[in-house]
């Protein structure tokens, strides 16, 4: 589901412990994949592009918008929570900075 936070299924869980789904549910349900942004630990935030977001029960992590990618829905299991409304508002400006004109 959009804005749900899932444990990373990748092998680099120390640096990327979680992924947040940013794609809307209507598209994800039709394609079988979701666009996600990694949530990174142990890196400094960067204003707008890589802001801090709160992972319920796990503290603050960096939303690494410059690493956005798609993943099969079947690989996303056992969500740990969802982004707050305040943190959801950080996504679009971050993506716009990554893909917009410079």
Image: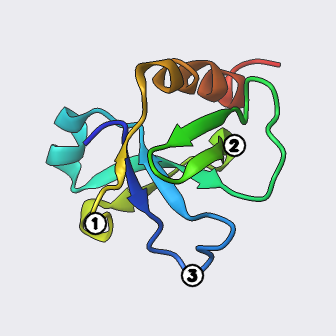
Circle 3 packing at 10 Å, graded few (<14), some (14-19), many (20+), is: few
Specify whether 32 is left or right of 60: left
State which tag comes first along the sequence, 2 or 1. Answer: 2
Q: x%, y% of residue 27?
A: 23, 38
Query: Residue shown at 35%/55% (left/top)?
Result: 80
Q: Quadrant of the C terminus?
A: top right
Q: x%, y% of residue 90?
A: 58, 22
Specify whether 73 is left or right of 16: left
Query: Residue shown at 42%/34% (left/top)?
Result: 83
Q: x%, y% of residue 54?
A: 55, 38
Q: Is residue 70 above or below residue 52?
A: below
Q: Determine which quarter of the picture holds residue 53.
A: top right
Q: Is residue 84 above or below residue 57?
A: above
- Mark 3, secondary structure of its residue: loop
Report which residue position mark 3 lands on. Answer: 11
Report which residue position mark 1 lands on. Answer: 77
């Amino acid at each position: 589901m959009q804005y749900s936070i899932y444990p990373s299924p990748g092998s680099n869980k120390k640096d990327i412990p979680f992924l947040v789904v940013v794609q809307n549910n209507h598209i994800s349900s039709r394609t079988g994949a979701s666009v996600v942004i990694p949530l990174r630990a142990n890196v400094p935030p960067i204003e707008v592009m890589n802001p801090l977001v709160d992972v319920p029960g796990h503290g603050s992590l960096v939303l690494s918008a410059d690493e956005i990618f798609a993943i099969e829905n079947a690989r996303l299991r056992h969500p740990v929570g969802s982004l707050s409304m305040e943190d959801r508002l950080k996504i679009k400006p971050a993506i716009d900075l990554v893909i917009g004109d410079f």
